[in-house]
Image: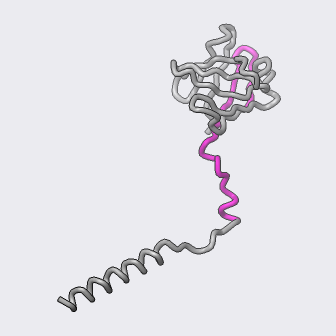
Amino acid sequence: MKTLMIAAAAGALSLGLWSLAAGRTGPIDAVTTGSVPASAAAKHSYTISNVVANTACLAERGERISSRSERFTADGDCDAVWPRLSAARTWLENGDGTVIVADAQGEAILTVVDGDGLAYEAVEPADAMITMISAD
């Protein structure tokens, strides 16, 4: 019985030491770790096209701001695609399948809806012939 208790204690001790050693990792490689952006997975790039004006630009949907909204940025040349599009700052999901792309004051610039595949299509203003295709 005494031998069995000693063997059990030795087993528990070695298991504890093994779990401590297994939890250790080597030093972090700052070059490798620093080369991977922390929020890379959260960003989505889009090519925004105006079929009528035959123009296109790039935009990015970024980090989450709230449960329904994310940051949105559009290049300066996006104003040629749709007026004030470069002022867009928010991507707001309405929960009904539509998304409002709004400026910093919350004023809607475009309202889009999920289209075919990885694309969104503008539904408001009604004359906006805009498509947003995922560039990721």
In this view, the residue in front, 3 or 62, is 3
The vertical placement of 13 against 114, above or below, is: below
| Percent position of residue 105, x then y | 76, 22
The vertical placement of 44 against 53, above or below, is: below
Q: Is residue 37 magenta?
A: yes
User: Which of the image's four quarters has the C terminus?
Assistant: top right
Residue sticking out furthest to the bottom: 3
Task: State left or right for residue 53 relative to residue 27.
Answer: right
Residue at (69%, 60%) from the top-left corner? 34
Residue at (62%, 29%) from the top-left corner? 69
In this view, the residue in front, 112 or 90, is 90
- Residue bounds of the magenta highlight: 31-58
| Percent position of residue 35, x then y | 69, 58
The vertical placement of 79 against 124, above or below, is: below
Task: State left or right for residue 13 relative to residue 94.
Answer: left
Residue at (69%, 28%) from the top-left corner? 90
User: Which of the image's four quarters has the N terminus?
Assistant: bottom left
| Percent position of residue 52, x then y | 72, 14
